Image: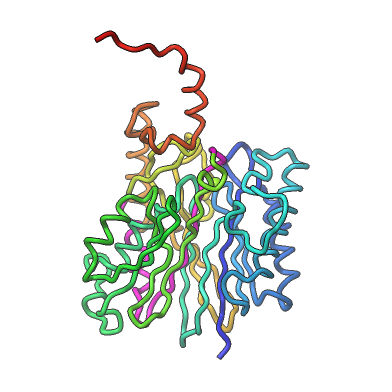
């Protein structure tokens, strides 16, 4: 049976005004380029945005890390960046960290989440896209969805997932990985993923090897060595039939949590689930936002999307996020609103410190 691959690849290639949203002309151009590739390298495609990030969702049969698919995404990003430059959009070409394509967009700026699988009788797919935060922001939700029975009752009452799941965790600093089995190693897993600036859940598998979730783990600051924008991650989760139900996958987003990112990628803020109509960053260039588009995958075709957070059921978490935003904003330049010093290493702060360095003198004994 032919396997289906789903690739969700994103980049910030310019926005307006400032860092708030993608210009409609860029969305149009990207969708046109992907539509032209349908029937050739692609089976289906869907283009959208979250804040200032251009999101390319593509289905095909070429497997993960396909040079052809990555090349297509790279071409879309570079051509859209050229248009953004012409329009003098803000940060045009921001996530294009290299001039020449080398076979894979990983390490070149864009964020990538991919999954290859044999389609089940029915295959619901939830695509999450975030702006103004970092890849580790998904850790909390992935734990809740796949390892917390207080969120996912299926872990207790569905024989198909009663055995639990396997989490693949990446250390984005040391560039190494480790597998944890839940529920038996839940506490060990939490040791690491509770520190989301460094440890990021990359994939989740069922114990029989079936792939259930995939995220982007690129950290732009670690790639570029200096502040070039936040990583604004994406994530895909398959649902139902021996996996968490769609409702169990989106349920943890009803709880407001605080993530790193927001203004200048240097602040903690509430992670607000919004419908597409609100996927634009405004207040203090935020607050950090997440959208969720739901699809059914049918022979590689994407049936959808359904805008999952565009719903009154998520009104309350949005209002709680706004309250948290008020509280954190009141801190101004103070921690814990501003990130800790170790996390500020890759921002513009070292430049300020450099200027003041010569004014420090030793305190007499
Ligand atoms: Mg962004």
Magenta residue check for 243? yes
The percent position of residue 85, horizontal first and vertical second, equals 74, 42
Residue occupying the point 58% across, 58% down? 106
Residue 91 falls left or right of residue 146? right
Query: Front-most of 73 and 184?
Result: 184
The percent position of residue 156, horizontal first and vertical second, equals 21, 76
The percent position of residue 276, horizontal first and vertical second, equals 53, 55
Q: Which residue reaches farthest top? A: 364
| Whether residue 91 is visible | yes
Residue 3 to residue 335: above or below: below
Residue 19 falls left or right of residue 202? right
Total marks in image: 0
Q: Quadrant of residue 62?
A: bottom right
Query: Front-most of 202 and 51?
Result: 202
Quarter of the image containing the C terminus?
top left
Magenta residue check for 204? no
Identify the magenta region. 226-255
Residue 298 falls left or right of residue 133? right
Query: Front-most of 227 and 117?
Result: 227
Quarter of the image containing the N terminus?
bottom right
Residue occupying the point 72% across, 69% down? 35
């Amino acid at each position: 049976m032919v396997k289906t691959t789903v690739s969700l690849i994103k980049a910030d290639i310019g926005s307006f005004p400032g860092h708030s949203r993608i210009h409609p002309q860029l969305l149009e151009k990207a969708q046109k380029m992907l539509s032209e590739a349908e029937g050739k390298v692609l089976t289906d495609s869907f283009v959208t945005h979250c804040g200032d990030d251009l999101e390319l969702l593509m289905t095909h049969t070429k497997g993960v890390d396909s040079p052809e698919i990555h090349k297509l995404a790279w071409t879309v990003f570079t051509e859209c960046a050229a248009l953004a430059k012409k329009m003098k959009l803000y940060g045009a070409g921001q996530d294009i960290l290299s001039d020449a394509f080398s076979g894979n967009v990983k390490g070149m700026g864009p964020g990538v989440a991919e999954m290859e699988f044999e389609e089940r009788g029915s295959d619901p797919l939830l695509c999450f896209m975030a702006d103004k935060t970092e890849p580790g922001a998904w850790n909390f939700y992935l734990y809740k969805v796949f390892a917390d029975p207080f969120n996912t009752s299926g872990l207790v009452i569905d024989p198909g997932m009663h055995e639990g799941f396997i989490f693949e965790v990446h250390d984005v600093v040391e560039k190494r990985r480790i597998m944890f089995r839940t529920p038996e190693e839940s506490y060990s897993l939490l040791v690491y993923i509770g520190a989301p600036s460094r440890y990021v859940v990359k994939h989740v598998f069922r114990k029989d090897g079936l792939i259930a979730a995939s995220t982007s783990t690129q950290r732009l600051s670690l790639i570029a060595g200096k502040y070039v924008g936040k990583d604004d991650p994406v994530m895909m989760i398959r649902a139902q039939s021996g996996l968490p139900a769609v409702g169990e996958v989106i349920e943890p987003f009803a709880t407001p949590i605080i993530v790193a990112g927001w203004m200048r990628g240097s602040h903690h803020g509430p992670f607000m689930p919004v419908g597409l109509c609100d996927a634009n960053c405004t207040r203090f260039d935020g607050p950090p936002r997440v959208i969720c588009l739901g699809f059914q995958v049918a022979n590689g075709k994407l049936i959808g999307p359904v805008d999952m957070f565009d719903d009154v059921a998520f009104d309350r978490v949005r209002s709680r996020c706004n309250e948290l935003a008020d509280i954190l904003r009141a801190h101004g330049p103070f921690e814990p609103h501003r990130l800790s010093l170790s996390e500020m290493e890759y921002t513009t702060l070292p430049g300020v410190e450099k200027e003041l360095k010569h004014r420090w003198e030793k305190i007499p004994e």
